[in-house]
Amino acid sequence: MTHRLSALDSSFLYLEDDNLPLHVGTVMIFEPPADGFDYDQLVELIAERIVSSPRYRQRVQSVPARLANPVWVDDDAFDVSYHVRRAALPRPGDEEQLEEFVARITSRPLDRGRPLWEVYFVEGLSKGRFAIVTKAHQALVDGINAVDISHMLLDTSGGDDGGLGDAADRPPYQPSSLRLVADAMVDAVRTPTMVVDNLRGGAYDLAAASRKAFGLVSGVLATLAQVGVKPAPDSPLQVTVGAARRFDMVRTDLRAYRTIRTKLTRGRYVEDVTINDVVLATIAGALRTWLQSRGEHLSSASVIRAMVPVSVYDDTGDHQSGARVTACFVDLPVGEPNPSMRLHQIAFSMRQQMETTQAVDAASLSSIGGFAPPTLHSLGSRTGAAMTRRLFNLAITNVPGPQQPLYAGEARLLSTYPVMPLTRKQALAIGLTSYDGQVYLGLNADRDAMTDLHVLADAIHEALAELGQSKRTRSSR
């Protein structure tokens, strides 16, 4: 039995080109156990874990004459060692060298002839550490049939769980071209407009793919029309994206954000401001510094609009059953000189959207099969990719993670940085994950447009310190 890609998943494949690879990644830095951790152990661990997610052993197969969307088929030549690769930094490797390595591999599209994922085992980091860098296509990680591979690798036990069954032993299923056509015709009877869409002009242009993605969600167009009445403002982030990337990793202390929230919001205002608002205010302050370093003119009304996928939970707080992603649009007030005022403006905007129909419920795009930051980052990037870039200047995903140590086998995870894909004509994407008392930011950027990405990375620390030293404004009392 074949499984057909949804129109949304298909659109990610059609929208992708050499300058715009649409995969999501994670950079994880580990401390090895006393007896070590090597490449062979990682290969064995991944081989065991992907048994529970057959999609990681499947590739995309096009249907003859494009009578229907592509299908997932078993890769009869699947070789886990092809997908799990070995790399090394010059010893003793530092974070800057790791960032450059991530930038290089992030810019490379995945092999369409094989399952759409890769994992790199990176040796040579200082203090005996190693890194695992993952890449998984947005068409693959839908949160239903497949979660992000980082999700499968990590657990809280620090040991081998095993016992995942024998699904990997089943013979691969390879449908013939005749079978693919027959299945497509059956689907065409059920959905006759599908054939017309796929045959039109013999090609699937970008505009058509975008419309297909939008058309999946009931009510999304009307909601986005409300948000997009006023297009996103012009900014240096709006450029024609090239093939090369820059990547910067930033680590901050979760306690600093909590302290700022407590200090700048008291009384009835405490419930109105979230940790996510403090994070966004920090990024707004960093963007302000970055713009000023470029000599950009900033007025009091200057803003940069961010698309912010926000994880939401039901009243029970059950991460497994209640998690979903809501995409909000917030104008980051980069022209506001007062950091406390920036925070409260952002908090008001976020609260207003969460309470109105302007928040687009990404559960309409795909539901989440279990809570895990890497998977939620993937779903957040899918939400952004399905929306017109005229509505926002950059995407910022902020996913709360576990506050206890995680392990790959017996190797302890020290830090984790999301790698979010760029969208067309947007030079920067920011992903954040909180984990074990820290907040980790991954800044992925166009290499030519963001030669000063390090300025923005350094400014994040400065903006956080500035918020910590700020006093409450009159309007916040």
Image (cartoon, grey):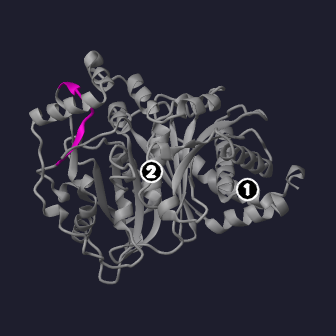
Q: Name the residue under label 2.
A: 367
Residue density around tag 1, few if under 14, some if 14–19, many if 20 or more, within 10 Å: many
Answer whether residue 68 is magenta in the image: yes
For marks 1 and 2, give the one nearer the viewer: 2
Residue at point 72% right, 31% down? 297
Q: Name the one closer to the observer, 342 or 356.
A: 356
Q: Distance between the residues labelled 1 and 2?
A: 27 Å
Inspect the magenta stretch and tell me whether residue 337 lies in it.
Answer: no
Q: Which element carries disc 2, helix, strand or loop? A: loop
- Dot 1 and dot 2 residues touching (CB under 8 Å): no
Quadrant of residue 295 in the image?
A: top right
Residue occupying image coordinates x 73% and y 56%: 273
* Left or right relative to 173: residue 152: right
Task: Return the x and y of residue 17 as percentages of the image width and height.
Answer: 33, 32
Instruction: Indicate the quadrant containing the C terminus: top left, top right, bottom left or bottom right.
Output: bottom right
Tell me the residue that label 1 is attached to.
273
Examine the image and state in which quarter residue 49 appears. Answer: bottom left
Residue farthest top in this picture: 201
Of residue 126 and residue 419, the one placed in the foreground of this image is 419
Q: What residue type is labelled 2?
A: Ser
Q: Which residue is drawn at 29% across and 77% down?
A: 160
**If you read the primary sequence from the N terminus, does the residue marked by circle 1 or circle 2 appear first?**
1
At x 90%, y 51%, the residue is 474
Q: What residue type is labelled 1?
A: Val
Q: Can residue 283 be seen in this view?
A: yes
Q: In the rendering, at what x and y percent does residue 207 appear?
A: 42, 23
Magenta residues, start to end: 65-74
Residue 172, image x and y in percent? 12, 52
In the rendered image, is residue 444 in sight? no
**126 or 111, which lies in front?**
111
Label 1's element? loop
